[in-house]
Image: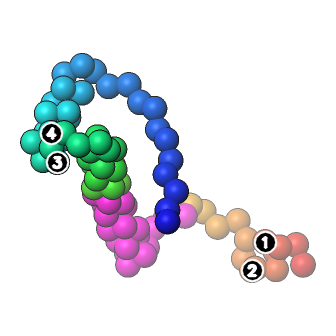
Amino acid sequence: MFTMGTITINVNDEAEQKFRKATQLTFGKTKGVLGRAATEAIEEWSDRKTRGNETKMLELLENGFKMGKLKYRTRNELHER
């Protein structure tokens, strides 16, 4: 069994009507279809956004990045040892 979270959001009327219509056409008019469609939409959006960040992070790892001017010569100076 899994737990479910609750999100309360406000969207404009046009977006709501489009979402409801698409949900009805895809899943029908049974109980819980709005939640099912919203979950699917949130997961797809999150995956799409995360995918872009992973690519950027991998590029930084491969190419490196400038960290500014070094203020310490050794690790001991940094940790005051």
| Location of residue 71 with respect to 15 vertically, above or below | below
Q: Residues within 10 Å of mark 3 (few under 14, many from 20)?
A: some
**Residue at the farthest right position:** 81
Give the camera-side residue of 11 and 36. 36
Position in image of residue 34 (x %, y %):
29, 40
- Camera-side mark, 3 or 1: 3
Position in image of residue 62 (x %, y %):
38, 78
| Location of residue 61 with respect to 11 vertically, above or below | below
Q: Residue at x 28, y 21 (%)?
A: 12
- Camera-side mark, 2 or 4: 4
Secondary structure of the residue carrying numbered label 2: loop
Whether residue 54 is in magenta: the answer is: yes
Kindly identify which numbered label has been placed on residue 74. 2
Residue matched to label 3? 27
Residue matched to label 4? 24
- Camera-side mark, 1 or 4: 4
What's the amino acid at mark 3? Phe
Secondary structure of the residue carrying numbered label 1: helix
Distance of label 2 from label 4 (alpha carbons): 64 Å
Secondary structure of the residue carrying numbered label 4: helix
Q: Residue at x 82, y 80 (%)?
A: 76
Q: Residue at x 28, y 53 (%)?
A: 40
Magenta range = 47-67
Distance of label 3 from label 2 (alpha carbons): 62 Å
Rendered image quadrant of residue 43: bottom left
Distance of label 3 from label 1 (alpha carbons): 59 Å
Residues tagged 2 and 1 counted as in contact (Cβ below 8 A): yes
Rendered image quadrant of residue 19: top left
Q: Which sits earlier in the primary sequence, circle 3 or circle 1?
A: 3
Q: Which sits earlier in the primary sequence, circle 3 or circle 2?
A: 3
Residues tagged 4 and 3 counted as in contact (Cβ below 8 A): yes
Residue matched to label 1? 78
